[in-house]
Image (cartoon, grey):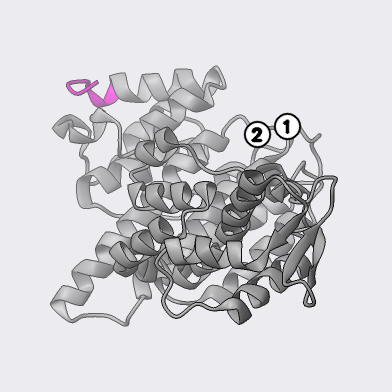
Amino acid sequence: MAHSTINQYLQQVYEAIDGRDGSFCSELLSFKHPHVANPRLQLASPEEKCQQLLEPPYDEMVAAHLRCTYAVSNHDFVEAAFQSHKEENWALPVMFAVTLDLRIFANNAEQQLQKKGKGQPAEMLEKAAEQLMSCFRVCASDNRAGVEDSKKWGMMFLSNQLFKIYFKINKLHLCKPLIRAIDSSNLKNDFSPAQKGHMPTHQLLRKYDLMQFADVTKGVSEGNLLLLNEALNKHETFFIRCGIFLILEKLKIITYRNLFKKVYLLLRTHQLPLASFLVSLQMMQLQDVDLDEVQCILANLIYMGHIKGYISQQHQKLVVSKQNPFPALSSVS
């Protein structure tokens, strides 16, 4: 592929489209594929060649892709292509590849303009978001096909790309319409409840180069408040840049829950002295913590449903239920 002629490349694209092989077609239109380094494919005006072998709208899509390889540019031909698939979604992987490249190019162009002092802030990213929203509307409005063949499955991928742009340009309010659109779709979209209470594995974090979260997940799972605080402090700049630092701070309540559950398992009684929780917090090197703060934390955990029980002020104890005193996180609303 790195040495293919333009005709050989277009023939492969034609065969992928004709065979409805969305996966291979997406590779042929992705900038992560080796063909983009082939000088034979870097044409300023590939339209005539594309029209000879490909039917509309694919000729325009591929021509736009080849112009990108020549000039690192992008054009809006994705929406037209997907509108033509009235009852099918096999080409969704193609859209995923093209829109991902669009966002990456827009981000690179934005950085280049900023270095040169040209253009308005976030101009390129906002233009990219407009194109992505065009694709999102096409997917969201697909009510003709059955669930399995629906283009609505593309909404999740496009939402993720748009979220990255909106976080980058600090327009988080624009995320809400996307979330509402997904919630109102007829897809099996209980993704949040399905994942609730489950931590990402070490392998998953390593795969996507998100090892900044490794100690965060370990600290929360083990109830290790000290490790969690150290991880938040160590990667504070990264988390702030991602706009999630305050969200991660909310994980402390789950960490308290897991830590206090360990106290319960060690003492093996449903009447737990408040002093035992104080000792556990002191072991986590919390500064100036006292019994009043312990009671405040416990009261919040009880209110949120993470602990079944009550605080006995008279006996200075936490009295927990004899049955399932620490409900699974997935069961807590």
Is residue 130 something that shows in the picture? no
Q: Residue at x 65, y 44 (%)?
A: 265
**SS label for mark 2:** loop
Q: Residue at x 45, y 27 (%)?
A: 25
Query: Is 21 positioned to the left or the right of 38 in the image?
Result: right
Magenta residue check for 3? yes
Magenta residue check for 133? no
Q: Which residue is mark 2?
A: 89
Work out how far the residue at label 2 is from the one at label 1, CA to CA, in angstroms: 5 Å
User: Residue 200 placed where, x, y %?
Assistant: 51, 42
* Front residue of this view, candidates 183 and 242: 242
Q: Which residue is mark 1?
A: 149
Crowding near the residue tagged with mark 1, few <14, some 14–19, many ≥20 C-alpha atoms within 10 Å: some
Give the magenta part as a residue range: 1-7
User: Residue 279 placed where, x, y %?
Assistant: 51, 64
User: Residue 93 placed where, x, y %?
Assistant: 52, 34
